[in-house]
Image (cartoon, rainbow, N blue to C red):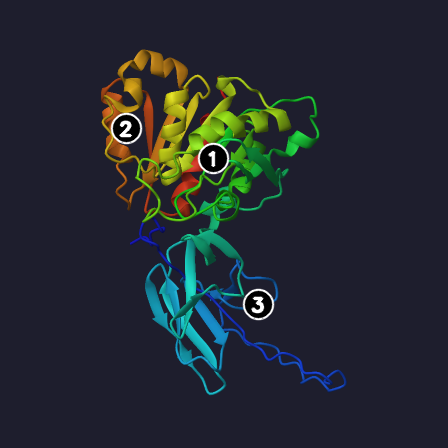
Amino acid sequence: MRIVHCFLVLMLSVSTITLSAQPQRGSRNQTPPPYVAPVYPDGTTATENNIPGYGYPRLDAQNRAYFSIEAPQVQKMVVDICNKKYDMNRDDKGVWTVTTDPLVVGFHYYFLEADGFRVSDPAVYTYFGCSRDASGIDVPEGAAGDYYSIRNVAHGQVRECVYYSEVSKKFRRIYVYTPAEYEKNISEKYPVLYLQHGMGEDQTGWSKQGRMQYIMDNLIAEKKAEPMIVVMESGDVEASFGPGSGSIEEYGAALTKIMINDLIPYIDNTFRTLTDRDHRAMAGLSWGGRQTFQTVLPNIDKFSYLGTFSGAIFGMDLKTAYNGVFNNPDEFNKKIHYFFMGMGSEENFGAERTVQQLNDMGINAVYYESEGTAHEWLTWRRCLKEFVPHLFKN
């Protein structure tokens, strides 16, 4: 059973804390206590998400996670991994420990609960998910995960940029990936993929949780993908849909106008891009998949590639959707060079059914299924790996 990603209902997750006394005035000349090397459980290694210098959390060969937290004044400590809670045990020195059940491979959000108060683990890096900063733990796949691992290949850059949107009347923050050769081939222009995250996440998600830049570096190095620029916007869905969000149709829908009127012109004016529709693509995961439909389908004059990864495409009448865009399959197939819809085998987001309906209407849509995964980052890493090699080949 896969651990599912947070979507509408917030999924929570796991980690480690050390609470230490602050140094006192006048203690400068005191002799520090002798150093005692930490002793870790045999066969365990620190997770790659740990901040350097922190030994916990750890993983063993069975993918069980080990936590050790020094918190002598806390009365109850719990590790919460996607709503599966593990009560921790306290020793006489106030150190809390627990070992989880084996975790499935992939990325997991988690939290600590100290006397009922939910906090991020200060021993690991934080990731924006579940509409807040969360702790994260990546359970490695081994060789199967080489495509998103850091390898000895030429590496691109992920940079943070700020632009002003006349639509939203505010400055907006984006992340932009440029391929390794971008800094060297200064006369070369590049196609652009606009890549969206899901509900409760932000523009950092694809580069942190999704490891997008390593997927791109590796595919480009293997000549499986064309060098391209990847743009990641916030999408205005950091806070999950709920009271105050407006209607479900309005939630995050402003992204379309922002992209068409502000973001695309900014990217084309700032970076060396190929500005025609044949060199512009958009894809998104979960709610970002819905935003991709909302943006591309009414603006086929500006895009020629389309992808959804566990896309939140609900309640859509394909015969009438987006002014009947699917009713002229010959015209649609001529303009959209590649139409991809993927999801995990353990989730029920309807992508397979939608693709079959589109195919029956004569639309060249392609379905991909990530075996054994649910609504989570491992599904979306795999979808990106499958989608990108088909871009900008024509």
Q: Where 232 sits versus 303, above or below?
A: below
Which residue is at a point 24% across and 19% down the rendered structure image?
361
Q: Which numbered marker is on residue 344?
A: none
Instruction: Identify which residue, 71 or 263, lies in the foreground.
Output: 263
- Within 10 Å of disc 3 (Cα), the crowding (few <14, some 14-19, many 20+) is some
Marks 1 and 3, Cα distance to the nearest angstrom?
33 Å
Left or right: 336, with 247 as reference point: right
Camera sees residue 227: no
- SS assignment at label 1: strand
Q: Looking at the picture, how far across and down is residue 58, in whole percent? A: 49, 66
Q: Looking at the picture, how far across and down is residue 242, in whole percent? A: 32, 48
Quadrant of residue 176 within the rendered picture: top right
Left or right: 98, with 36 as reference point: left
Q: Tell which residue pokes out farthest to the front in this image.
A: 169
Nearer the observer: mark 2 or 1; the answer is 1
**Are the residues at dot 1 and dot 3 in contact (C-beta closer than 8 Å)?**
no
**Which of the two discs, 1 and 3, labels the residue nearer the N terminus?**
3
Identity, as a three-letter code, of the amino acid under mark 1: Leu
Camera sees residue 130: yes
Q: Where 11 sits versus 161, above or below?
A: below
Q: Which numbered marker is on residue 195?
A: 1
Marks 3 and 2, Cα distance to the nearest angstrom?
46 Å
Left or right: 119, with 333 as reference point: right
| Residue hosting label 3 | 54
- SS assignment at label 2: helix
Left or right: 31, with 370 as reference point: right
- Within 10 Å of disc 2 (Cα), the crowding (few <14, some 14-19, many 20+) is many
| Residue hosting label 2 | 355
**Are the residues at dot 2 and dot 1 in contact (C-beta closer than 8 Å)?**
no
